[in-house]
Amino acid sequence: MLIDTHAHLNFDAYKNDVDEVIKRSLDNDVWMINVGSQYTTSQRAVEIAKTYPEGAYAAIGLHPIHLNTGLVKIKLDKEEIEFNSKEENFDYEKYQELAKNEKVVAIGEIGLDYYYKPKTKTKLELFKNKQREIAFQQLKLAKDLNLPVIFHCRMAHKDLIEFLLTNPEVRPEKAVAHAFVGTLDELKKYLDFGYLIGFNGIIFKKIEGIKPNDSKAVIGTPSFQSVVFEENIKNTPLEKILVETDCPYLAPPPFLNQRNEPMYVKYVVERIAKIKNLSYEEIAKTTTENARKLFKL
């Protein structure tokens, strides 16, 4: 059995065949957590989870890239949601009500994202402050509901770590750093918090000539392809690893440039097993246990 701890079958990429994809995954003994990026996709994740007695769960949250800051224009991703291009203001009570469903197992994905950002120094600081403000509110929601957190962080690990250190009243005890692509120092900081580390298809990408702790270790591109170094996996204890797909994105090598799906998480497990020189069965068993424990599945 495997658990894809970060899927997006609630996105429009699956609007025509979501049930077929879920059935295919469950038939292959792969469970999934569908993760919200704004209210509409969070609501859809809950609706999907309610349809299945077992094997499909939901996380709800406002992704920082969808936050209405009034300072930057975000390009619409048609894979995510085709008809709603409006940026969102976080409504604590709406998300709190949505989280009452028993299939909601986490608040996420939430955090900081500096990929799209204003160019002027003044606007950039306002932009970062707004992201921190909404992150604080969502972490408070997680604390109030006693739910773990799924952190999204892109080109902002230093700031997120500082934010967590300086706001202990909302710093979650249980969380995962989803799709981790930071440095070894940043990895250690998250592990010191007691957090788990999520690895997905990014681990198949590499760049030669850059050291694991180099500031250039995280390289963004327009398609959000990043670099993860094998040292991150080697230095993450197995009991702290979660596996994920982030589907429909980041399909593994056999399916490059195709739509990803939860059952392909097995390729991530295979890669981690090879890097750690452990058996596939041990990685599968332990990461499943890790997911069950964090999300109370």
Image: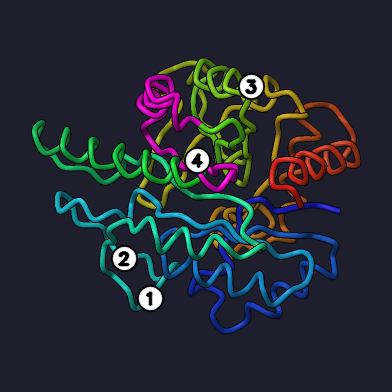
Magenta-tinted stretch: 144-171
Name the residue located 56 percent from the left edge and 53 percent from the top edge. Answer: 250
Mark 4 or 2, which is nearer the eye?
Answer: 4
Q: Is residue 45 left or right of residue 70?
A: right
* N-term mark: 3 or 2: 2
Residue type at numbered disc 3: Glu
Residue 249 in the image: state x and y as whole percent. Answer: 53, 57
In contact (CB < 8 Å): disc 3 and disc 1: no
Name the residue located 52 percent from the left edge and 26 percent from the top edge. Answer: 208
In the figure, residue 99 lies in which quadrant?
bottom right
Q: Is residue 150 magenta?
A: yes
Using a 10 Å C-alpha cutoff, classify the residue at mark 3 as few (fewer than 14 neighbours), some (14 to 19) or many (20 or more): some
The alpha-carbon separation of the residues under discs 4 and 1 comes to 24 Å
Query: Label 4: which residue?
Result: 151
In contact (CB < 8 Å): disc 2 and disc 1: yes
Mark 3 or 2, which is nearer the eye?
Answer: 2
Residue 217 drawn above or below residue 104: above
Query: Label 1: which residue?
Result: 82
Residue 182 in the image: state x and y as whole percent. Answer: 49, 27
Using a 10 Å C-alpha cutoff, classify the residue at mark 4 as few (fewer than 14 neighbours), some (14 to 19) or many (20 or more): many
Query: Label 3: which residue?
Result: 231
Taking the view exactly as shown, the residue that stands out farthest to the bottom is 16
Query: Label 2: which residue?
Result: 76
The alpha-carbon separation of the residues under discs 3 and 1 comes to 38 Å
Residue type at numbered disc 4: Phe
* N-term mark: 3 or 1: 1
Using a 10 Å C-alpha cutoff, classify the residue at mark 2 as few (fewer than 14 neighbours), some (14 to 19) or many (20 or more): some
* N-term mark: 4 or 1: 1
